[in-house]
Amino acid sequence: MKPLNAHELRRLARRRLPRLAFDYLEGGAEDETTLRANRQAFERVTLCPRALNDVSTRRQEVQVLGETWMSPMGIAPVGLAGLFWPQGDIAAARAAAAAGVPYVLSTASSSTLEAVARAGGNPWFQLYVIERGMADALVDRAHAAGYRHLVLTTDVPVSGRRERDLRNGFSLPMRWRAATVWDVASHPRWLAQVGRHGAPQLANLASTAAGDAQAQAALLQRRMDASFCWEDLRRLRRRWPHALWVKGILHADDARRACQEGVDGVIVSNHGGRQLDGAMASLDALAAVVDAAGGRPVLLDGGVRRGIDVVKALALGARGVLMGRLPMYGLAAAGEAGVAAALGLVREDIDRVLALLGCPGVSHLGPQWLAAGLRPVPSCTASPG
Ligand code: FNR
């Protein structure tokens, strides 16, 4: 059955994965307010289509830092993708490369960054700073392996409290409980794959001298170096010679400061609602960050489930979006083919939305397509009535 949309892909993922793996993918922090806010923000934005424009051809390629993406979307970094499919990072990277869109590999990946680079495409590398020496070593390895984009995640000074994971005992090493054993045992297809390929590891750390169990546990629990600050960003800028992005920015002043420190682009994100519960929806932060970034590319993630969401983000000034859960639903449902299906759905959506909107290409998107932009602006010279 070909899934019609993200809901159906999600259902397939949920059926195949044990609960502990599905909850890890799906969950947000605490009451999941921010997780929901990301979707609600998209639902609040409405568009105003234009009539009788020639939309017989519609273009969705975008230029980002001199590179062409075939669609204005990419795959966000997702740790432990091997939990969803054996060698899940490689499968997702291949699907992204085939679709002509970027794939961002997490520090917490289950294949090494070298193995993912060898699998082809042009993957990006996302950096968590657990310890500065370890981070420097990862940056140097990414450089040596041919990565050309580095994404520093800034919104994890400590781990958000994801209560689903706490309830399921999801940790390294796993805290097995009777319910977890039963959960895993009742998903034989998943279990057979894990049996064949081994339990997923945090491979980037396992292959370093520092790759002890403690470092792996710190990464899984996102126990980071909370003292990492603007001076460290400056140092990172000096160390990394290619494109540098900061991810997890919601405040315009932080975007401005990051640009002053020499980053090449900004990713507006609240980590898919997995960190600060109560943080604003990323879509609500977008316009001010775009303004502050002064022409540098801004990407958005958080809540993107359909092409219409991509179009709304672009109308609000994003150059493109990243997606975390949606391609991972595809990965969990059917491996590389499932990720390709997820990306294909969004690509088809964007094409149809552009036609229905009367817009010949994504480069034409801007605030003029937003219904909110049509509201009469109150005139300050009008007499009070
Ligand atoms: C993430 N995210 C994430 N971000 C990051 O910088 N490094 C990481 O290792 C991870 N790991 C991770 C695991 C899982 C299971 C999820 C769902 C998310 C956050 C991710 O990059 C992105 O910001 C959000 O997923 C975007 O929200 P949506 O698209 O999932 O709604």
Image: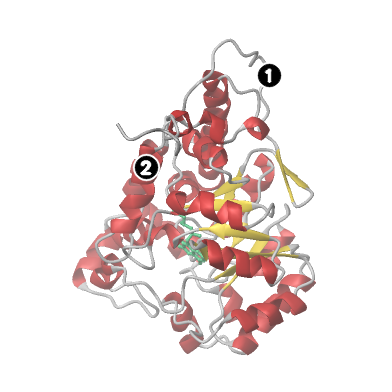
Task: Identify the residue under disc 1.
Answer: 57
Q: Is residue 170 above or below residue 56?
A: below
Ligand 1 within 8 Å of the CB at mark 2: no
x and y, in percent, of residue 89 in the image: 57, 59
The disc placed on residue 226 is: none
Viewed as shown, does residue 283 lie left or right of 76? left
State the residue in front, 384 or 287.
Answer: 384
Task: Identify the residue under disc 2.
Answer: 12
Amino acid found under the numbered disc labelled 2:
Leu
Q: Is residue 9 above or below residue 131?
A: above
How packed mark 2 is, by other alpha carbons closer than 10 Å (few <14, some 14-19, many 20 or more), is: some
Circle 2: element type: helix
Q: Who's the residue at 65% across and 40% down the image?
A: 99
Q: Is residue 85 above or below residue 133?
A: above
Based on the displayed image, in which of its 4 quarters is residue 60 positioned? Answer: top right
Based on the displayed image, in which of its 4 quarters is residue 320 positioned? Answer: top right
Q: Is residue 379 above or below residue 91?
A: above
x and y, in percent, of residue 308 in the image: 48, 33
State the residue in front, 211 or 198.
Answer: 211
